[in-house]
Image (cartoon, rainbow, N blue to C red):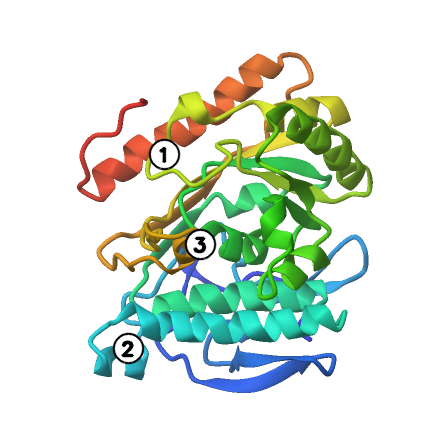
Amino acid sequence: MMTAGRSPTMGRSRSEPASSRSSTSSVGSSFSIRRATTTDRSAAPAIRDETGIDLTNYFPGDTYATDPGKRRARLDRLLCGTRWVFYADYVRVVLACSRAARRNRFPDEAWVRSSWQVLDSMERHGARFEIEGLENVAALRAPVVFVSNHMSTTESMVLPALIRPHRPVTFVVKESLTRGRLFGPIMRSRDPVVVTRKDPRRDMVTVLEEGSKRLAAGISVVIFPEGTRQDEFRPANFNSLGVKLARKTGVKVVPIALRTDFWGNGKWFEFMKEWGPLHRDRTLRFAFGPAIDPASDAREAHREAVDFISGKMREWARLDGRPAWEPK
């Protein structure tokens, strides 16, 4: 495994090379999925975290942008960009992860790799990513609470590859995600904070108690304070639970702004929410803000997190030629 270090890229940013050939590798004897060769990000450096685990850092720069010359998957081109080609590739990755997790052979390195593979697959099926603020994650020396807006399945799939190489991390998730045959074993293997989404008071107690345990063990926690996916960021729906958890445990808050409506949400049944249309004209955007200390004023810390996300929504609306964003 390669030693840690930054790739020699201009402006400390990193774009995907055009070539994306693949080979096979495995973790343990249960987890085996396509892994990139040295022509792309498998050449990324490894980071040894504070627990002594070597994790591949697929995003070693401060920013990342999809290479505009990256070729679309052949089958995607032949079948005129139908979303089901991407979903077939996505399910292949998830099935491999689920089998490994059921056998207790899904370590963090496999989680990070599968997260990157979902992002890579999305790019090979027309997605364009713009990611910024990665230096704010790399600079962390203690667990934090990440608070993020929530638009689609994308963030749950991609954030592990962006965060875990730097800090141990888990998520606050709804209980139903831990029970399914496909995603359930994966979710349970991550030791998440599980909420019902039926009793807000009970969920708040659960997040404060269980989240405190994870943070005390050195594990950062990702919270989506809106509770469920939103087609637009609405500050009024962004609760302060993440800031309350951070203040209770004496850690900082890192805001994450994202726009991930490339991966649309299905509209008919709960199961179909994962299998919505792909909007290839929409750039996927992530931004990590500087860490915020809520110790002296939790209300001000919450306002700073909301202002960071709101500012990115306005900026991205201009960049993407969308209608001007204003809070609702």
Q: Is residue 152 left or right of residue 75?
A: right
Residues at marks 1 and 2, CA–CA distance in whole angstroms: 32 Å
Helix, strand or loop status at disc 2: helix
Res. 154 mark = 3
Res. 312 mark = 1
Helix, strand or loop status at disc 1: helix
Mark toward the viewer: 3 or 1: 3
Amino acid type assigned to the residue bearing label 1 in the image? Lys
Residues at marks 3 and 1, CA–CA distance in whole angstroms: 18 Å
Q: Position of residue 280 (x, y in %)?
A: 25, 60
Q: Is residue 98 left or right of residue 8?
A: right
In the depicted structure, whether residue 322 falls above or below residue 70: above
Q: Position of residue 155 (x, y in %)?
A: 48, 50
Q: Position of residue 118 (x, y in %)?
A: 47, 66
In the depicted structure, whether residue 37 falls above or below residue 230: below
In the depicted structure, whether residue 318 falls above or below residue 116: above
Q: Is residue 2 left or right of residue 76?
A: right
